[in-house]
Image (spheres, rainbow, N blue to C red):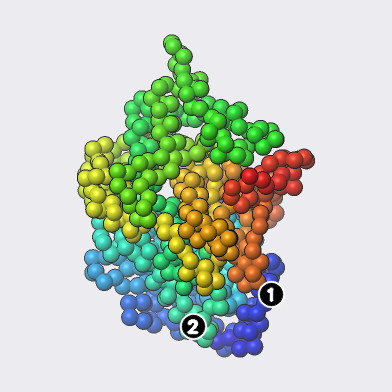
């Protein structure tokens, strides 16, 4: 399964494959790939064990009728490849192993791509699907000749169990925080060496949500390991997010809970106040930062004697104001942060791709918060309340309404050091040629986009704007929810990274598309400029569905 040295040179010197539908820079392997693939089974390197390895036939593009996210409905076409499953033994016999999958294409471009996870992980990331923000109809990274791989982060979620249960074991939680991704990266690199006889010329990492936190963790903790990193909607300041999400549930208990019909009331009011701020009437808030200052929840307060779904009570208004406000700690955590930014406005009524989308999915659910959480609750409550019990207090029976961070300060600080990917000093990553792209969705209610914006601005303060601009970009997409629905959200960030890393072509303003999840055309319904922070799209002239009708400006 070794490759031709001449072909290797060709593969690593030409970097145009990402812009071509075919595998323009592929290297043909010598020998019998099937025999070499099966020969990987049983191999071990200390704690790393290879459990199975088998050739997979090419598979066609498939689109499911339903999915947890728009992108989750699309299974891209993949070429012939060697599927390797393995695990890494724990040190603590009570801790679970770290499971991983590595996909070795017969024709290899000399590159690798590690996929990040999501939520509390516990599910094996195969590396066979669409990476974050990827256009639906584009050939998969594996089809472009990337070795792709992922991990379950060192634990397996089981039906009926809280997703945070694993956190009661120290080693399992440390693996989840950062160690699993590093260990699997090293295991994948060793497999690549064995399979092809050469290390990867370039290594990339792409992750969204928890995977976005993992992506930033790689740049901060392991700056020598990756050449290009993409972090979409990263859940950085993780400790703050869990506490702020729990607070959001507590203020909606009882009379503070906002009914689904009232969610539409708020969403309509936000659009009425801010839709035309960019100069167009397109049912999209292009300037959510300005809108947050403009929209006042109290404008929907019920008048004396008024009630029902056409107005809000004082407790409901207070709940929204709490959601929009920072969560403040009484002590500083990792990297000096002592708060979590409040959420913004717009996208409150984004239809839910169960279990994602808008207030009903993330904040409110379809039933008021309960203890223990029930499936009808908002995800922020399910994650946050469970996090308080299993991660911070480590007491599964804790009454979350009685929890105070001060009572668990030592553990909160310990978790912050492990989980908060907020270190702005990524100078070593940049000095060795690494490139980082961050994308925030401005209608995200799973995590506050202002946390990522603050991180980017802290990087600029730490390194200086000119130095940071050499290797870091932040883009913000208006109207898009956590998983990429509600507004134009698809853009090929892998190609952007490859161009920047391998040809030095630094990205400027880009373009995002909202696509119909329908093969084979995946029709573009509308498109917008994807502006570098702090710019946002302003309307000039033309159809509001065309990116050319807008321009980026602060």
Residue at the location (50% across, 39% down)?
A: 344
The residue sitting at 54% across, 61% down in the picture is 468
For marks 2 and 1, the one nearer the N-term is 1
User: In the picture provided, is 351 more to the left or to the right than 395?
Assistant: right
Residue at (62, 79) in percent of width and height: 12
Q: Position of residue 513 (x, y in %)?
A: 66, 50
Left or right: residue 129 versus residue 136 is left
Which quadrant is the C terminus positioned in? top right
- Residue at the spot of label 1: 24
Q: Is 7 situated above or below 209?
A: below
107 or 445, nearer to the observer: 445
Q: Is residue 340 left or right of residue 276?
A: left
What quarter of the picture does the N terminus occupy? Answer: bottom right
Q: Position of residue 28 (x, y in %)?
A: 62, 83
Q: Would you name the residue on which mark 2 appears?
A: 193
Q: Which of the 4 image quarters holds residue 93?
A: bottom left
Residue 259 shows up from this direction:
yes
User: Which residue occupies 57% across, 39% down?
Assistant: 288
Query: Is residue 485 in sight in this rendering?
Result: no
For mark 1, does the 10 Å Cα neighbourhood hold few (<14), some (14 to 19), or many (20 or more) residues? some
Q: Residue 92: percent from the left, percent from the top?
A: 24, 69
Q: Residue furthest right?
A: 542
Q: In this view of the protein, which residue sits in the foreground, 207 or 416?
A: 416
């Amino acid at each position: 399964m070794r490759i031709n040295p001449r072909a290797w040179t060709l593969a690593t010197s030409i970097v145009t494959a990402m812009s071509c539908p075919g595998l323009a820079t592929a290297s043909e392997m010598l020998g019998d790939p099937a025999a070499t693939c099966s020969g990987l089974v049983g191999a071990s390197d200390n704690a790393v064990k290879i459990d199975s390895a088998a050739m997979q036939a090419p598979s066609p593009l498939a689109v499911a009728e339903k999915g947890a996210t728009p992108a989750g409905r699309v299974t891209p076409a993949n070429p012939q490849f060697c599927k390797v499953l393995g695990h890494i033994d724990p040190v603590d016999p009570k801790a679970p192993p770290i499971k991983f999958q590595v996909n070795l294409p017969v024709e290899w471009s000399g590159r690798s791509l590690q996929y990040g996870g999501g939520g509390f992980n516990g599910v094996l990331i195969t590396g066979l699907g669409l990476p974050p923000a990827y256009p639906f109809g584009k050939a998969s990274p594996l089809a472009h000749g990337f070795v792709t791989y992922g991990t379950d982060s060192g634990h397996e979620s089981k039906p009926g169990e809280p997703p945070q249960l694993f956190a009661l074991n120290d080693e399992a939680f440390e693996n989840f925080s950062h160690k699993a991704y590093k260990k699997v990266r090293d295991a994948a690199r060793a497999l690549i060496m064995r399979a092809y006889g050469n290390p990867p010329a370039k290594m990339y990492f792409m992750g969204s949500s928890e995977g976005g936190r993992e992506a930033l963790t790689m740049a901060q903790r392991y700056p020598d390991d990756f050449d290009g990193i993409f972090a979409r909607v990263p859940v950085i300041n993780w400790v703050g997010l869990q506490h702020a999400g729990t607070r959001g549930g507590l203020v909606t208990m009882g009379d503070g809970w906002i009914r689904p019909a009232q969610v539409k009331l708020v969403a309509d009011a936000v659009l009425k106040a801010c839709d035309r701020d960019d100069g167009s009437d397109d049912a999209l808030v292009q300037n959510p930062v300005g809108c947050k200052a403009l929209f006042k929840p109290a404008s929907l307060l019920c008048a004396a004697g008024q009630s029902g779904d056409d107005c809000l009570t004082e407790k409901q208004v207070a709940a929204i104001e709490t959601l929009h406000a920072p969560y403040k700690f009484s002590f500083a955590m990792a990297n000096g942060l002592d708060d979590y930014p409040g959420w913004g406005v717009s996208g409150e009524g984004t239809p839910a791709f169960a279990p994602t989308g808008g207030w009903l999915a993330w904040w409110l659910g379809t039933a008021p918060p309960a203890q223990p959480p029930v499936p009808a609750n908002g995800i922020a409550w399910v994650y946050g309340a469970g996090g308080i019990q299993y991660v911070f207090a480590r007491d599964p029976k804790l009454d979350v309404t009685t929890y105070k961070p001060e009572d668990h300060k030592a553990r909160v600080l310990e978790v912050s050091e492990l989980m908060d990917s907020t270190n702005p000093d990524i100078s070593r990553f940049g000095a060795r040629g690494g490139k980082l792209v961050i994308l925030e969705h401005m209608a995200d209610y799973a995590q506050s986009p202002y946390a990522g914006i603050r991180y980017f601005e802290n990087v600029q303060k730490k390194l200086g704007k000119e130095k940071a601009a050499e290797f870091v970009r932040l883009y913000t997409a208006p109207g898009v929810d956590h998983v990429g629905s509600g507004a134009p959200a698809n853009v090929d960030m892998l190609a952007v990274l490859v161009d920047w890393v391998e040809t030095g072509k630094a990205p400027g303003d880009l373009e995002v598309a909202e696509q119909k999840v329908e093969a084979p055309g995946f029709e573009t319904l509308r498109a917008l400029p994807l502006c570098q922070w702090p710019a946002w799209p302003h309307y000039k002239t033309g159809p509001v569905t065309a990116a050319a009708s807008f321009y980026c400006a602060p």
